[in-house]
Amino acid sequence: MLETAIFSGLGHKMNHILLLLLILFSGCSGYGQMFLESYTNPLKPQVFKLTDGSKSMYYKFSLDDGSNADIYLFFIGGSGCHSYKYYLRQYLEGLSGNIKVFALQKRGVSDRTTGFFSCGEQFDEKDYFGQWVVDQREFVSRVLDSVASKPRKVLLFGVSEGATVAAAVAANEPRVTHLAIIGGGGMKQIDELRILAEKKKFLGDIEDSYRKILADPESSSKKVYGHSYHYWSSVLDRDPIDFYARLNIPILIGFGENDSSVPVEAVLALTHQFQAMDKTNLTVHMYPGADHMLKTKEKSYRPDFMKRLGDWLRTS
C-alpha cells in the first residue's frame, strides 16, 4: 500500500541529502534545478484508488489560475520510479494556456521516490505495458467522467516509454482530442535496440538477452538492463503503429536528431507509415543535434517544443 511506502524519518533525511548532492553535482542546472524548484514550489500528491483496490499517487495543477481551464493535459512519463513531484511543473516550462495538468504515477511510486535506487518488488511486479495502459485508461476516463463542465480539448502527452502508452490510451478513449509525444516513434523496441547496437549506442548482447527474456517472459525478479523480463517482454515486440494507425486526431512529436535511446529511424518510420496510409494528422519537429531530452551541450530545446505545443493546441 502506498500509505506504508512513505519514507521513515531517516529516509526523509537521506532524501534531502540526495537532493543537495544532486544540485551540487549538476551545477543547479537540468534536473538539479528542477529538483531545487520542486522544493520551493512543490506539487501536492493525491491518491487515486483503482477499481481493483490498489492505489497510485497522482498530481494535478493548473498552468493559469485554474478558473477557466478548458484544456486537460494528461502526462504519461518515461521509465523508472521517480516521483513527478520532483520535475513535472518545471518540465512543462514554456507551455502556456488555460490548461489543467494531470499525472498518474505508476503503481508502487511514493511522492518521495527519487528513482536513483531500487524501485522495489511492489513496483517491479506491476511495471509492464498492459498494466500501464489499464491504469492510465481508468485514470483518464474517471477524471473526465467526474467533471461537470467538460474540457474543450483533451491532450495525452507521452514521453519516451510513455509515448506508446499514450497512443494506446488515445486509441481507446474517444474523448481524447490531441496527442503529443517526446522521444517516441513507430518501431518495435527490439528493432530500435538493434539499430542502436549497430550504431554502438547500446552496449550488450541484444540477441542473447532477447532469447533469455522470451524463455521466461513473466518473471518480475529476473532483470536485464535495469528492468524485469516481464517489463521487456511486454514492450520489445509491441508495434506502436497498431495504435497510431487508429488515430485521426492531431499528433505532435518532438524528437532529438541525436537521440541515443530511440533511434531517429523510429520517427522516420512513423512518418513514412502515415504517408503510406494517406494520413495528414502527424506533425514532427526534429531538433538538430539534440538528445532524448531535446537537449544539446549548448541548450535545451524543450521550452521551444512546449511553446510549439501550446500554439498547436490553440490552433488545431
Image (spheres, grey):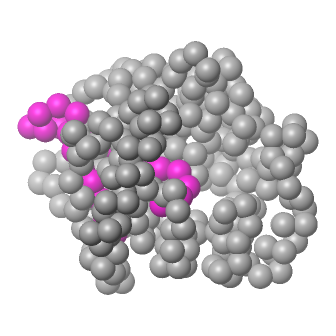
Is residue 263 magenta-colored? no
Residue sitting nearer the eye, 242 or 112: 112
Q: Residue at x 39, y 47 (%)?
A: 19
Residue 137 in sight from this viewpoint:
no
Image quarter of the N terminus: bottom left
Span shown in magenta: 55-81
Depth check: give the residue in front, 180 or 7. 7
The reply, left or right, for residue 52 in relation to residue 40 is: right
x then y, percent, for residue 155 = 37, 42
Q: Quadrant of residue 47?
A: bottom left
> Residue 239 at x, y = what percent?
70, 55
Residue 64 falls within the magenta-colored stretch: yes
Which residue sits at x=8%, y=37%? 67
In the image, residue 90 lies at what x, y percent? Answer: 35, 34
User: Can residue 124 be seen by looking at this rendering?
Assistant: yes
Q: What's the residue at 74%, 53% (across, down)?
A: 189
Is 238 rendered above or below residue 184? below
Q: Return the residue nearer the eye: 118 or 292.
A: 118
Picture layout, residue 292 above or below residue 79: above
Could you say which quadrant of the image residue 144 lies in? bottom left
**Residue extending furthest toward the left:** 67
Q: Position of residue 162 (x, y in %)?
A: 53, 51
> Which residue is rendered at x = 51% and y = 22% of the image?
300
Camera-nearest residue between 265 and 174: 265
